[in-house]
Image (cartoon, rainbow, N blue to C red):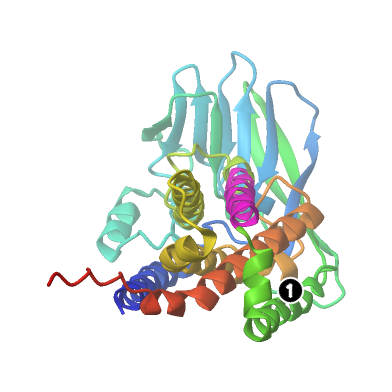
Amino acid sequence: MKHVLTFVITILVANFIVLSFSISAANAHGVGGIEASKTRSRVVAITPNTDLFNVRAVENGERFKITRSSNKDVVILGVDNEPYILINDKGSFVNQKSATRLINDSSSQSSTNSHTKEDFEKTSADPNQIPDWKKVGNSQTYIGHDHRTHYMGSVPNGVEDLGKSFLHIKSGEQIYRVTFAFYATTGSPYLIYGPILLCIFIAILAFAYFQKNRFTKIMNRALTISFLIALGVLESIHAFGYVAFSNQSFIEEFGSIAYSMSLIVLSVLSALRLINSAFKGLTWDKDLSKQAPLLCLTGFVGVFVGTVFEYKTFTYPYLPTIFSPLFSVLLVSAIAILSTLLFVLGMANIKSGSHIEEPLPASVN
């Protein structure tokens, strides 16, 4: 009963943690932070041509990235042609009096009512008023959100070209027009992978249920350790693709990849425990009964965090990763299959742990 009780408590804690944090995360941007998208943005023209700066859409257009590449100041103009963003030798700055700043910050859930009132008081309706610059970075690159650089609204069925929008940037005495084009793709060609994975999951469950001994024999120690290592490596690749896509550092995005990190840690910990038991000479049957709760938890986290929470990988065309959609689908599918195998292996052997009793000491007469 001790093993079963440990398993139940562990699963309850895991469910509490996953469900508690997933609610707030999903409300913000999705479980991974940046959501998959049905649309994307792309810079198609800068008029006139210039090498004073370069600008591009990032995160499927959710944000834009501009880099100053000369000794001239670069100023992004706001919706009223007021100075909005400044990049110079000292870094990047945001004009606190810009109405555009208020518009772009209004979608942030961290903005409170009192903070909004303060913003209104700072904002000036006069685009010619002297700016109140607030430093936001030390580099020559600024990455930020602007409603003008991504598509807003519903996507009409069958429409792929969603139009254009413009950002005006001033450097020296010249004003440049940056054209952002918006595109959409209807549906995803990888939607069929979802039902296929579900069928695989059911097949594994059925095989383990009706052929438990054979399933356990196939999933020997070496194969299980290999699957755990592979799971950790694949989830690491998955997390790396997201962090690289976000244009943020690992530390800045740690909160968004906390689920991935938990799966990686569980995979490594499970593999190390199995390796350590092998060196101690424990048989696979006895060791499997002891390690079943941890294997079950690792598989559970992998199925839900690495697969269920990533369902948009199969349903959305533009994903928050530097990898191609096909590679991402195959990556998530592999994580799903490995996690299912580990979860079922743990579940199939966890009850046996309650029947393993220590031998009674010999009676001394």
The quarter holding residue 116 reads bottom left
Residue at image location 79% in from the left, 76% down from the top: 196
Residue 231, position as x, y percentages in the image: 61, 53
Residue 303 located left or right of residue 192: left
Residue 61, position as x, y percentages in the image: 67, 52
- Quick check: can you spot residue 108? yes
* Region in magenta: 221-240
In front of the other: 241 or 281: 281
Of the residues shown, which amino acid type is indicated by label 1? Leu
Magenta-drawn stretch contains 271? no
Residue at image location 62% in from the left, 33% down from the top: 66
Residue at image location 32% in from the left, 48% down from the top: 122
Q: Quadrant of the C terminus?
A: bottom left
Residue at image location 51% in from the left, 21% down from the top: 88
Q: Quadrant of the N terminus?
A: bottom left
Q: Residue furthest left?
A: 365
Magenta-drawn stretch contains 224? yes
Q: Helix, strand or loop at disc 1?
A: helix
In front of the other: 137 or 246: 246
User: Eyeballing the image, is 240 above or below 299?
Assistant: above
Residue 73, position as x, y percentages in the image: 56, 21
Residue 173, position as x, y percentages in the image: 64, 23
Of helix, strand and loop, which mostly describes the magenta segment? helix
The quarter holding residue 96 reads top left
In front of the other: 166 or 254: 254
Residue 145 located left or right of residue 108: right
User: Eyeballing the image, is 24 above or below 108?
Assistant: below
Dot 1, how many residues are within 10 Å of its Cα: few (below 14), some (14-19), or many (20+)? Answer: some
Q: Residue furthest top?
A: 71
For mark 1, what is the residue?
197
